[in-house]
Image (cartoon, helix red, strand yellow):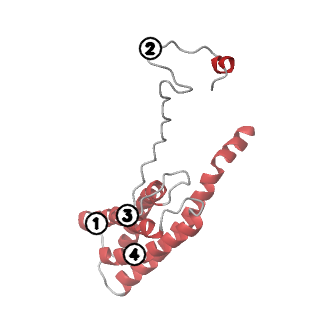
């Protein structure tokens, strides 16, 4: 039983984060599915165009929900930086979804609402794995990450600690070149420091 308790303690934070991310993802997927079907099935837009527009709408929702709920414990590196990266990474996720839809439509020659929704579900599932990994890596940084430069959006190089200035020969605490090392307690014995 202690093994299970230990595992729970160790991974509880990750499990809670995954549950929140999954909840946001499920709602964003529902937005994508509803908007995509309304545009494709209802208004007759092409599959890829409908999915693209639906993804932009869902991405806006997902960014706000992930920033202020799922990853609120992580450092905020600037709304503009996070928003641009979030959308760029969602663009990669969209391309992953489009690959599945393209194979379904152009390679397998499957058309209609069932084929559209099946490829959308499978493509979105694959894209979600990429999104979770990439958000944690580049968008919602851990609190111990180096600060991010506002101009570039890249992590700043950590400042090197200043090296102490070596003592100068002839001064208290310093030795002349070539002189033997002082024994321990020398300063107390001679009264110098």
Q: Secondary structure at mark 4?
A: helix
The residue that mark 4 highlights is: 56
In terms of sequence position, does the residue under pointer 1 or pointer 2 come before the other?
A: 1
In terms of sequence position, does the residue under pointer 1 or pointer 3 come before the other?
A: 1
Which of 69 and 12 lies nearest the eye of the viewer?
Answer: 69
Q: Position of residue 108 (x, y in %)?
A: 27, 63
For residue 111, what is the image quadrant? bottom left
Tag 4 and tag 3, C-beta contact below 8 Å? no
Mark carried by residue 178 = 2
Q: Quadrant of the N terminus?
A: top right
Tag 1 and tag 2, C-beta contact below 8 Å? no
The residue most toward the bottom is 43
In terms of sequence position, does the residue under pointer 3 or pointer 2 come before the other?
A: 3
Q: Secondary structure at mark 1?
A: helix
Eye-nearest disc, 1 or 2: 2
Q: Position of residue 128 (x, y in %)?
A: 45, 61
- Give the class, few, some or many, for how many residues have Cα within 10 Å of label 1's Cα (few <14, many ≥20): some
Point 55% across, 63% down: residue:
22
Tag 2 and tag 4, C-beta contact below 8 Å? no
The residue that mark 1 highlights is: 102
Eye-nearest disc, 4 or 1: 4
Which of 55 and 35 lies nearest the eye of the viewer?
Answer: 55
Q: In whole angstroms, how far apart are the C-alphas of marks 1 and 3?
A: 37 Å
Q: Position of residue 107 (x, y in %)?
A: 24, 63
In terms of sequence position, does the residue under pointer 4 or pointer 1 come before the other?
A: 4
Point 65% across, 51% down: residue:
12
Which of 19 and 85 lies nearest the eye of the viewer?
Answer: 85
């Amino acid at each position: 039983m202690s093994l299970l308790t230990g595992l729970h303690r160790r991974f509880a934070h990750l499990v809670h984060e995954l549950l929140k991310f999954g909840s946001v993802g499920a709602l964003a997927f529902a937005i994508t599915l509803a908007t995509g079907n309304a545009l494709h099935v209802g208004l007759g837009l092409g599959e890829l165009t409908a999915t693209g527009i639906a993804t932009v709408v869902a991405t806006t929702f997902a960014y706000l929900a992930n920033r202020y709920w799922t990853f609120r414990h992580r450092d905020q590196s600037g709304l503009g930086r996070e928003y641009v990266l979030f959308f760029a990474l969602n663009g990669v996720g969209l391309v992953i979804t489009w690959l599945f839809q393209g194979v379904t439509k152009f390679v397998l020659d499957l058309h209609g609402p069932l084929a559209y929704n099946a490829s959308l579900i499978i493509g979105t599932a694959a894209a979600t794995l990429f999104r979770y990994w990439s958000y944690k890596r580049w968008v919602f940084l851990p609190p111990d990450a180096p600060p991010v430069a506002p101009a570039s959006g890249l992590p700043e190089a950590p400042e090197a600690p200043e090296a102490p200035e070596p003592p100068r020969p002839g001064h208290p605490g310093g030795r002349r070149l070539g002189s033997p090392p002082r024994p321990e307690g020398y300063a107390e014995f001679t009264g110098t420091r």
